[in-house]
Amino acid sequence: MRRNVANDSRQDLETLDATESGGGPAAPTIHLTLQGKEGVGKSLVASILAQYFRHRSAVIHCVDTDPVNQTFSQYSELGAEHLELMHDGKIDSRGFDVLMERLLIEDGTFIVDNGASLSFRSGATSSKTTSSNCSAPAAGDCAFTR
């Protein structure tokens, strides 16, 4: 089964519209920018997503996990924070657990920017998708509702 990213984006917009019109809180979402190549605009896409959701009055949490170029966390206005997920070229399971716990427990919209050197290469996933149910465009943005 493939996910239709366009429908997911439309669903996010409808959820935010319902929130603004008094229809209740927006469903928490997670947006990951993933791509194995450097310099393709992952941080730019993440910053645009963060600005969009913030403009729509969503509670946003911006996380930069790039171990080499922490571009996203330099956008101080977005409150993006850097999270160390790699030590000595290996994924630090403690840091990864912190990220997963936040994604599962905290409310709001998460925008996570991953660098080219940290593309979740666990064997089960590729650098372009985060699960077999996600069909992502070139920049690698997939939206998931918890």
Image (cartoon, rainbow, N blue to C red):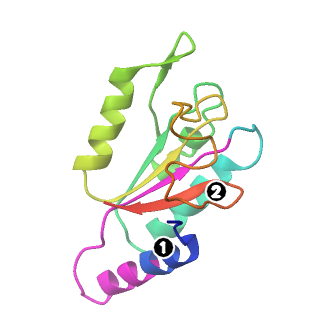
Q: Nearer the viewer, residue 83 or 119?
A: 119
- Height in image: 112 above or below 87? below
Rendering coords of residue 29 (x, y %): 38, 61
Range shown magenta: 13-35
Q: Amino acid at mark 2?
A: Val
Rendering coords of residue 120 (x, y %): 53, 34
Rendering coords of residue 110 (x, y %): 41, 54
- Classify the position of the C terminus by image quarter: bottom left
Which quadrant would residue 5 be assigned to in this image? bottom right
Rendering coords of residue 88 (x, y %): 54, 9
How many numbered circles are shown? 2
- Name the mark on residue 45: 2
Which quadrant would residue 27 be assigned to in this image? bottom left
**Residue at figure coordinates x 33%, y 22% from the top left:** 94
Q: Nearer the viewer, residue 111 or 125?
A: 125
Image position of 126 (left or right of 27): right
- Height in image: 111 above or below 8? above
Is residue 118 located in the magenta-colored stretch of the structure?
no
**Residue at figure coordinates x 24%, y 87% from the top left:** 22
- Height in image: 132 above or below 120? below
- Name the mark on residue 63: none
Is residue 30 located in the magenta-colored stretch of the structure?
yes
